[in-house]
Image: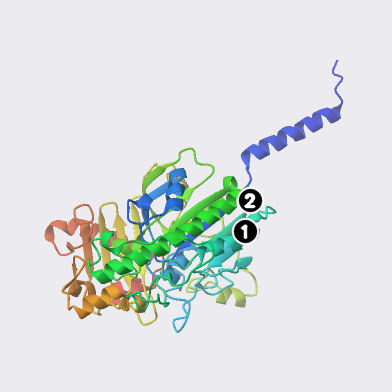
Amino acid sequence: MNTKPPLFYLLLCLVCAFALHSEAAPAPRNVVLFIADDMGQDAGCYNNPDVKTPALDQLAHEGTRYRFAFCTTASCSASRSVILSGLQNHATGHYGHAHGSGHFSTFGSVQSLPVILSRHGYRTGRIGKYHLAPEPVYHFDEALPGDPWNSLGMAEESRAFIADKSKPFFLYFCPLTPHRSGGQIEGHPLQPNPFGNHKNYPGLIDVKYDEAKITVPAHLPDTPACRAELAQYYQAISRTDAGLARLIALLKETGQYDHTVILFGSDNGKPWPGAKTTLYEPGMRLPLVVRSPDQTKRGVVSDALVSWVDLTPTILDIAGVREVLAPARQTGDPEGGAQQRAAAKPKPLVKYEFHGRSFLPTLDGATPPGWDVVYGSHQFHEIQMYYPMRAIRTDRHKLILNLAHQLPYPFASDLHASATWQATLKNNDTHYGKRPVSDYVHRPHYELYDLKSDPEELTNLASEPEHKAVFDELAARLKAYQERTRDAWFSKYEYE
């Protein structure tokens, strides 16, 4: 005869149900998105022995290093809009810099990463460089104080935010280094733009670099001016790495490290002509290191081609946000908000679509089918720098469409003022690195490169008959992508 009271079975069922629920739905992970400023794949873990990055190297040892990670536009403000929206900036209106006379900003209909995470129970905080507009679209719960040139100090300012365990957190950590700065180093030949190294900070131990021992990358000229700037750039990267090291230490001290996914990247390539503001490899191929406490494999190197439009979907995947809903857009309403506000009834909610997708399936080093292409889309840097470009980059080829090829290529002010470029002009050099100066300034309508045989993108194959099939295929795929992502410049196919 069963002598157990009914209450016993009820309690047993509740305990089992709770256990099953806990197993199926683990606690959401914290997320740190660390975005350096103007940093290319210049780190020890990216096979550059000249620069010392022990914290990033250790992160790669514990996580996954992506060899083929790409921004979509090699310009700070526009790229950050892509990072936090999962959309190409040609579709959001954030065509260039948010500050100053340009005042570019994102359409009010865009659903940004921090806003979505906040709606789903996350505390969201940012510190350092922001460079986005409007604030309501990219709203964070907290804007932490801190000198963006001092990544070490930024980490300390983040302590209280990190230590709070009331909710999972998303921290957007953005130092200004290794961006060029307007400061000066007393007695140093680089005036101005010594990469922010002119100011010392408490607790910071600088790593200095010998200009004579640096290996100059092939896309830059091997000149005394360039070597001097590279030494300062590497010093600023080491400062960035020191901030990463302190941030990781704080995560460990607060007991959060084993509950936090860390993603390290950059907004665009190194701040030299030929890199930043271009869709050549040095401008758009960037570091991406991800360390998750849930990884089954560590020290992984992934060959999947991932893009910055994938960052927002990936972080939402980490947070367990499987679907995002937003008001339906009306035909002919690119901002998606004006007609909605005027309508008597709210529009129904529909599934919100990103231009990217979660790359978590590639975290263990696997390369599932379909991770072999990325797209680039650049419009402006500063408002004076109109030079729209589109690119498709596969695991073998890159096709660049220069939409304003009739114009000379415009220079960002900090790049034009660089000691490297000024020396090129002063010496009347015909080449900048291995590229003729004339080819850099005046570009054809299309550029096609075989990255396997020509990794430095020097031989344009766009008009070569033997490469016509490749050209036609890539041009068609690029055009289809522009149409699919509502590219305002798509109309140029019809009237030019």
CB under 8 Å between discs 1 and 2: yes
**Residue at x-position 56% and y-position 70%:** 137
Which of 171 and 352 lies nearest the eye of the viewer?
171
Q: Residue furthest front?
A: 187
SS state under label 1: helix
In which quadrant of the rendered view does residue 224 lie?
bottom left
Q: Residue furthest bottom?
A: 101
Q: Is residue 374 visible?
A: yes
For marks 1 and 2 on the same chain, the one whose residue lies earlier in the sequence: 1
Residue 331 drawn at (x, y percent): 49, 71
> Relative to 208, does residue 261 appear above or below in the rendering?
above
Residue type pointed to by label 1: Arg
Residue designated by label 1: 159
Circle 1 residues within 10 Å: few <14, some 14–19, many ≥20: some
Q: Is residue 452 left or right of residue 86?
A: left
Q: Is residue 112 visible?
A: no
SS state under label 2: loop
**Residue at x-position 46% and y-position 77%:** 104
Which of 487 and 199 lies nearest the eye of the viewer?
199
Circle 2 residues within 10 Å: few <14, some 14–19, many ≥20: some
Query: Residue 117: which disc?
Result: none
Badge count: 2
> Relative to 396, does residue 375 appear above or below in the rendering?
below
Residue designated by label 2: 254
Residue 32 drawn at (x, y percent): 54, 56
Residue type pointed to by label 2: Thr
